[in-house]
Image: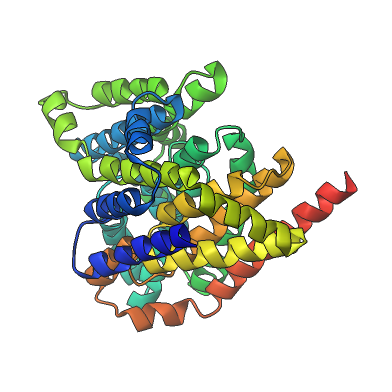
Amino acid sequence: MVQLLVVVLSYMLIPILIRRKVKLSYTLLITATVLSVFSGIGGGAILGILGSLFTSVSSLNTILVVSMVSMLGGIMKHYGILNRVVEKLQTITGNKKVSMMLIPALIGVLIVPGGAMLSAPFVNTIGEELGILPARRAAINLVFRHVAMFVLPFSTSLLVIGSILPELDIYRIIGLNLVMVAAMLGIGQLLFLREVKVPKVEKAERSGHKLADIKALLLYSSPIYICVLINLIFGVPFYVAMVASLVTAYFLSDKKDFFKVAGKSFNLHIVLTVIAVLVMKDVILHMEDLMGMVNAMFSASGSVVMVFAVIFFTSLLIGYITGYSVASLAITLPLISELGASIGLLHVYTYFAFGCAFIGYFFSPLHLCQAFTLQLMGVTTNELYAQYKLYAPLLLGTLIASVAVMLGFMSVI
């Protein structure tokens, strides 16, 4: 009971510190420190946890990939590679409505500080041309910007899942996540863009060499997808595959001050955030009394449905109060790992925890992307939430319904 109280009180620090404008990375490091000191697991265990950050293959892979992706994002932004991708995308689609969906989704691929600020100006300008209200523009930017985190193996959430539950097949999780991707794209388009009237760009205004535009798009976006292809085809660690992405970005840039730009693009705060999450995860796993209590609670639930109920409320609540989905996963995934579930059920539990953590984070007033977007577009929180009155229940309903279908399918097999 004491260890449970320590965890609860430690995590209560997160919203308090964030409201006091403490950076998220420092907030999580402070939380991790408090949790470690009062966990009761002993100094030796804590030193072992810190050492494992640089000796554990999964932890090291996570830290290196996050570091390299942040550098890639800064490089692509600095040398205008990202702008070229956006320009070619608009030329190829010839439809501003489609561009409003694809631009934030594409920019969302990159782990860039204030990433919402990169896509928001594009969405704001196009939305203004189409006569879309500012609050709806903000919703469009936020909804479509977060699609990538469900499907890219180097997104922070998926890296953390791979680190906490290395026995899982990340590409299988991504396959399950396609349900949420389809829901976000479909519901988002239906609620926010369906009624928007927009003529396609006249042929005279479009490039006469569409094939050349497609080739250019593939070329300039290659730093984003080449690492995924290398990892899939050759099975090399992601941090090795990321080297190819950085090399590709080098040849696409004008090479002036490249290494200086790469160094400046390194985002220490993202790395510290991931380190804090990994430490908290390992500390929780070492808290034997807490793990015993959790196992007893899940055993007493008597059904898979009750297990899902516990995951639902825990993941959603922590995601909401912290405004950070990874913080939620850092708490729930270690608990899920102790359930002794079959590998198939473990994938579904993780998919559900991921979805709930995301929904809590996405609609949290502490969500940083939301804060950036509202500031740029001059929209209040209440105006934005009014846009979500149908989107939120439909997205949550899709998640719950998809889990029911998955469980039904597993029972048939």
**Residue at image x 61%, y 35%?**
168
Q: Closer to the camera, 129 or 313?
A: 313
Q: How far across and how far down the image is residue 368, in percent? A: 30, 62
- In-image side of 195 versus 49 (left or right): right
Indicate how the structure is coloured in the image. Answer: rainbow
Residue positioned 82% across, 47% down in the render? 410
Q: Can you say whether 392 is above or below 270 in the image?
A: below
212 and 280: which is toward the camera: 280
Quarter of the image for residue 95 reads: bottom left
Who's the residue at 11% across and 25% down the image? 256
Residue nearest the viewer, comparing 229 with 87: 229
Number of dots carrying numbers: 0
Kindly tell me whether residue 220 is visible in this rendering: no
The residue furthest right is 412
Left or right? Give the position of 218 relative to 337: left
- The answer to whether one can see residue 268 in this image is yes
Q: Is residue 185 above or below residue 135?
A: above
Image location of residue 260, percent across then percent down = 11, 28
- Image spot of residue 210 (x, y percent): 45, 37
154 relative position to 115: left or right: right
* Residue at screen point 36% across, 65% down: 9
Q: Quadrant of residue 264?
A: top left
Give the percent coordinates (x, y) of residue 239: 38, 24
The quadrant of the rendering that contains the C terminus is top right
